[in-house]
Image (cartoon, helix red, strand yellow):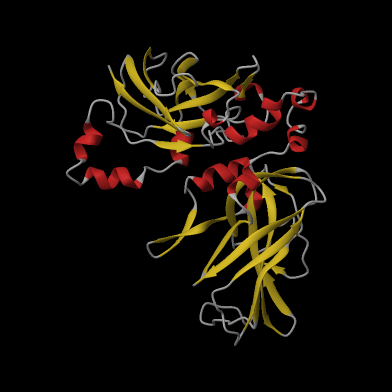
Amino acid sequence: QRSLNKDIQFIPSQVVLQGFLIQSQTLHSSSFCGKHRSSIGSREEPYCCEFIDEYKDIVKLSSPSTIFKVKLGDNFDKTVSVISLPVLSDGWCDGVCSFFTAHLFKDISITSAPSFIPTSHARMECWEQGFHPLPRRHVTAGQVVDVKVELSDISVILSWVGDREDYEVVQSSQIKLLNSRFAQSLSYELLNVVPKVLDVGGMVISNPFRYPSVKSVSFHGYIIHSKKLLNWVRVNPLALCLGNSSQSDILTSEVNKYRTLLHEHVPWSTLDHTKLSDRLLLLQVSNSAPEVNSRTVEFQTLSPLPPTAVVFWTVLEFHSGTQFCSADEPLWRPAAVVFGEEVGKRDRYRLCVSFSGNSFMATIAGV
């Protein structure tokens, strides 16, 4: 402590970056929308910096593993490697929490590890940890998952090993953890088709009509006012570019007046919001007429507050008569289309919704 002051800079003889799998719905939601992303100059980094201890819903799913180690004098080349993380408990992995340990001199080392990670090194409690968001993946105790590590300049990029389908399709053994109705179901549709079409974050991840057993897909939801949800998202940068171009009339037209952004994994049960409408049938698309994929909904607002988002659930109906409603599942969360702050206060609004392939969009305008 006598040596540490603002006029002295220490160059560590060795730095080790470690990481572990975590579950945190709150952290996952805020990081994917870019609220706390780190940046170097004008470049946004693929991770965010957070005080992990402040998040009360953090669940540690694995022990820390070394992401990379570098010693003074080593060549720090751009590399790609794979780390294996043994899972300690069942859960939904939202990403990797990273922290570093720096060896200064003799037996003195400092670490940025969060408080719940045991360490013999001095903790730097004023330093944040890194959070590398990943697409949600269910993991089970005893499983070993692989994460790809890419070192690019001074960035660390983490991603799942394998194709997109490998981590977004929930296996039938994992579905049993979600709901007792699944555990007792012998339905091919529920065990095989639903996980390939819907993500637990509320998004449609593939075209449902690729599967002949799907009869229709419908979207239900509420129009809400929520400053919290608005703060979690950023305006689509493409919309900002268009606003300064000859195409600006696209943004100022009656229907497409407001910039929109999709947001998944909306924590509906705890989200601070005001409902501005009753539950609405937003859109239903049939396998027999998939080209009829848009609809205009007019509604009378229930509150003088301006609408900031439409929060929606998905219902899949099968030719067998089976129905799956994501709103009925305790671990399925809705998604939202966030309009932005420019929507004015009106008594009535016109909501235009459309669905194409796996993309659901909505725009709003006053009537």
Quadrant in the rendering for residue 325: top right
Q: Does residue 199 show up?
A: no
- For the point 57% across and 73% down, which residue is it? 79
- The reply, left or right, for residue 91 in relation to residue 37 is right
Foreground of the two, 262 or 213: 213
Q: x and y percent of residue 235 in the render?
A: 37, 42
Q: Tell me the quadrant of the picture where the C terminus can be found.
A: top left
Residue with the most extreme right position: 142
Q: Is residue 52 above or below residue 353?
A: below
Q: x and y percent of residue 49 in the render?
A: 55, 57
- For the point 70% across and 76% down, which residue is it? 109
Foreground of the two, 235 or 211: 211
Q: x and y percent of residue 269 in the render?
A: 61, 27
Q: x and y percent of residue 248 in the render?
A: 20, 40
Q: In this view, does 29 lie above or below 40?
A: above
- For the point 68% across and 50% down, which residue is it? 22
- The reply, left or right, for residue 281 in relation to residue 97 is left
Foreground of the two, 305 or 266: 266
Foreground of the two, 20 or 53: 20
- The reply, left or right, for residue 274 in relation to residue 42 is right
Q: Tell me the quadrant of the picture where the N terminus can be found.
A: bottom right
Residue with the most extreme left position: 246
